[in-house]
Image: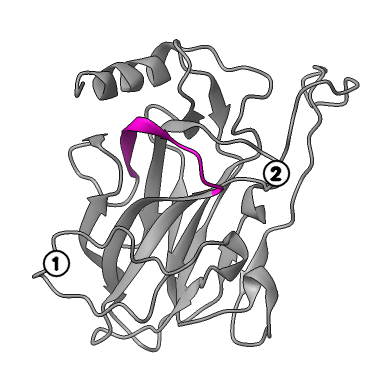
């Protein structure tokens, strides 16, 4: 049974992208749960994000070397989609002179990371034995802090440095969809939510996709999250 996960990762590497699979328009967001008190006694923080909706994500954390925050990468899909998530590839970036990441852990069943993960510009590939069907799925967690209260900094998700940024479904070979947007967590500054999975949707369109295909694409606006906002997907801080 556990051999399935490496096979899915192999499928991510060799499968041909389709115009619009089940995860078209899906995004990868960052969210910090300020109620979680980090301790090295805990082996995993999976299940502790504390949110079930992308719109509730908190994307700004306190900037302080005395404030270790646990934050999560979550795959977010449109409420109109039918996710069947089996695999994902993505990367991370930040200024290592401003932010320290002390620990990380996968919420999937199998992981192959670049040797320096989660250092800046590194990447990881994750798979699950069973498809994940929720519209918001915890992918992994991080524990980190900012070195300087007076210097705002951030952590950003991005494409894997080798494999790119993609979602894979449970087909054989896997149908791949590009990750449409990546979240940013700010320390002492606003973060960003890339559209809560509403980047695009496809199938049966009229030929207005960027590549001239039949899928339809809807773009989002990336908006900052900060204390000056009072609600919505960009109005929370921790």
User: Is residue 134 shown in magenta?
Assistant: yes
Residue 16 visible within the image: yes
User: In this rendering, would 181 be left or right of 33?
Assistant: right
Q: Nearer the viewer, mark 2 or mark 1?
A: 1
User: In this rendering, would 209 be left or right of 182?
Assistant: right
The image quadrant where one finds the N terminus is top left
Disc assigned to residue 183? none
Residue 97 visible within the image: no
From the top left corner, tell me how far across and down residue 113 is, in percent. Answer: 24, 37
Callout 2: few (<14), some (14-19), or many (20+) C-alpha neighbours within 10 Å? many
From the top left corner, tell me how far across and down residue 23 is, in percent. Answer: 59, 33
**Which residue bears the numbered disc 1?**
42
**Which residue bears the numbered disc 2?**
199
Quarter of the image holding residue 147?
bottom left
Q: Secondary structure at mark 1?
A: loop
From the top left corner, tell me how far across and down residue 77 is, in percent. Answer: 60, 45
Residue under the image location 41 percent in, 82 percent down:
151
User: Is residue 206 shown in magenta?
Assistant: no
The dominant secondary structure in magenta is: strand
From the top left corner, tell me how far across and down residue 123 is, in percent. Answer: 32, 40
The image quadrant where one finds the C terminus is bottom left
On screen, residue 179 above or below 43: above
CA separation in Å, label 2 and label 1: 35 Å
On screen, residue 122 above or below 68: above
Q: Earlier in the sequence, mark 2 or mark 1?
A: 1
User: In this rendering, would 22 be left or right of 12?
Assistant: right
The residue range painted magenta reads 122-135
On screen, residue 79 above or below 178: below
Residue under the image location 27 percent in, 19 percent down:
4
Residue under the image location 30 percent in, 48 percent down:
107
Quarter of the image holding residue 180?
top right
């Amino acid at each position: 049974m556990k051999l399935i996960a490496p096979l899915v990762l192999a499928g991510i590497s060799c499968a041909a992208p389709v115009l619009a699979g089940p995860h078209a328009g899906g995004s990868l967001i960052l969210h910090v749960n300020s109620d979680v008190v980090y301790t090295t006694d805990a082996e995993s923080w999976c299940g502790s994000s504390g949110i079930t909706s992308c719109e509730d994500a908190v994307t700004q954390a306190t900037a302080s070397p005395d404030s270790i925050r646990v934050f999560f990468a979550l795959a977010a899909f449109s409420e109109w989609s039918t996710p069947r998530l089996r695999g994902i590839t993505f990367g991370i970036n930040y200024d290592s002179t401003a932010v320290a990441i002390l620990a990380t852990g996968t919420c999937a069943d199998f992981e192959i990371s670049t040797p320096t993960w989660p250092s800046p510009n590194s990447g990881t590939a994750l798979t699950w034995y069973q498809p994940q069907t929720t519209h918001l799925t915890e992918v992994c967690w991080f524990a980190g802090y900012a070195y300087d209260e007076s210097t705002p900094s951030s952590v950003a998700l991005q494409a894997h440095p080798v494999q790119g940024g993609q979602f894979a479904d449970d087909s054989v070979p896997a149908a791949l969809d590009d990750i449409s947007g990546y979240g940013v967590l700010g320390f002492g500054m606003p973060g960003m939510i890339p559209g809560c999975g509403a980047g695009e949707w496809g199938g049966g369109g009229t030929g207005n996709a960027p590549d001239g295909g039949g899928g339809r694409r809807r773009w989002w606006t990336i908006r900052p999250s900060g204390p000056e906002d009072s609600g919505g997907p960009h109005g929370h801080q921790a």
